[in-house]
Image: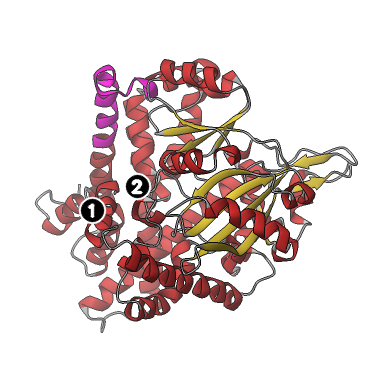
Amino acid sequence: MSFELANLPALSVLLTSLLTEEGAYALGLASYQMTRITGLEFVVFYTAGVLLGDIALYSFGLLARRSSLMSGWSWLQQRVASANSRSGQVSAAHRLDEYLVLTRFVPGTRIPTYLYCGFSRYPLWRFVVILGASGALYSALGLLLISLAASQFDMSHFKWYHQVALAVVISLMVIKFTKGLSKLYGYKKHYGRAVLPLKVDLERRFDSEFWSSLSFYLPFVPYFVLLLFRYRGFHRVLRSNPAIAHSGVFGERKSDIQKLIETHVLEYQLKLIEVPSEPELAKKTLSENFTFPFVLKPNSGLKGAGVRLIKTAEQLEQVDWSTDWVAQQYCQWPHEWGVFYVRDLDSSAGGVFSVTNKVLPKVTGDGKQTLFELILNDSVLRPRLHSLLGEESGLKPNHVPEAGELVHLSYRGSHSQGCLFLDGAELLSKEIETHIARVFDRIPGFNVGRADIKFESLEALSRGEFRIVEINGAGAESTNLYDPKYSLWQRYKIVALQWRTIFEIGKKSTMLHKANASLISFFKALWFSA
């Protein structure tokens, strides 16, 4: 071989890869560009380093399996066994071969996949061969790109930091390029086409309705800081809802809030109970309290994450009982609103800040177009394509509904899972607002937050007939901001008014409840939940 094991730059690449593969990639390309190592040394040492890390993760998964009965991992062992028995060990292994290749090119997918490989006793020799070959290909791609760059430009005058910057740029290009290819491959396999789903992806990037929380709220930070100075600290917000832990800004448990509903507005509750973590006891508890269908929710969750509608005993067998679940009665009433409630502490009477009309998406078949085509041709549903037809949806993108057939695309009232959130201000009559406000006025210490309610019709709601799905505290969004008709500026106006209202309520509540939540307790809870 043309390299030496004592080559320190090459060894640095190997050792760095044990901590961060992307960092090792950039370091290796920079070392190659500065002629500290050869291309062969980069490929060999980078591949060896990532393989060592991959095998370590595989080993942890294998050890977890062997100690599963003692460590509480038996649920995962049973899931692996049942999955293999249903699909066959050989076919399951072939699907994992394909996924292993993709993980090398998509950061963030590696740790869970390699742990699972060890836990499921995927053949080690196959694991090493596939990841070794894909690692070598991945590093060779970077070499090719940086060599092409060098051939196009005279780099003799480049400083060392220019070389490093070039290596970082090339590394990012490779990561983005390979992630894009793997995404195209996934779209092609699932939808039968690749370009149109990718185009939808790109369109969503320019629509603030679908931005990530970080992207959306980052420009709002200066205004939030201004509120902090104006109201002399964040502790005002933490004291806005004395009845809820940390006022519901973070970490409130659904079961704790349910006790508030049971205590003060029992006749409006949808039955909700905590589920034991032991599988047999959990099933027994659920059978004694509910009939199918019912809803399972993580006890602490955001934006509908993890919520499942359980319709059959077979679906119940698929549940991961290590999660802290709560079960709730399923309400058949067709209409759901997200009502943002605020209480005027000067008069102790509440009102409605905003109403979000949650519309479950559906399409009507024409006997010709597939579900994929029907969604793409609907301007409102189009950006929700991946939420509605993703692999976890259970819907077949190429299914052709009969003419006139109504297909419900989602039963979850969560924006992130495809539900349409429309501003319902025009539906809110004075009579309805009075009924809603009177109910939440009866809950002492709940001054601001969003309540999700279900009802049979507007006529029934105007008579005060509704049920509470859940209550969220001061950290909840006024979800009418997700109405597709709103511009980015209009959305920020809603958020600004919402937070100014929360701070104002917190200021008044602080004067009434001086011993309530503190910043220290809040950050302590935040730290221990991480």
Q: Nearer the viewer, residue 54 or 352?
A: 352
Q: Which residue is mark 1?
A: 524
Check if mark 1's residue and mark 2's residue have beta carbons within 8 Å: no
Q: Nearer the viewer, residue 323 or 466?
A: 466
Q: Secondary structure at mark 2?
A: helix
Instruction: Count the numbered circles shown.
Output: 2
Q: Which mark is residue 136?
A: 2
Closer to the observer: label 1 or label 2? 1
Q: Which residue is the extreme one toward the left?
A: 6
Q: Residues within 10 Å of mark 2 (few under 14, many from 20)?
A: some
Does residue 89 appear anywhere in the picture? no
Position of residue 452 in the picture relative to residue 503 (left or right): right
Q: Which residues lie in the magenta part?
A: 56-76
In the rendered image, residue 214, in percent from the top left (x then y), is placed at: 43, 65
Q: Which residue is the extreme one toward the front?
A: 347
Q: Secondary structure at mark 1?
A: helix
Q: Residue at x 61, y 22 (%)?
A: 291
In the rendered image, residue 498, in percent from the top left (x then y), is placed at: 51, 69
Position of residue 96 in the picture relative to residue 401 (left or right): left
- Give the dominant element type of the magenta stretch: helix, strand or loop: helix
* N-terminal label among 1 and 2: 2
Residue 104 to residue 478: above or below: above
Q: Nearer the viewer, residue 224 or 36?
A: 224
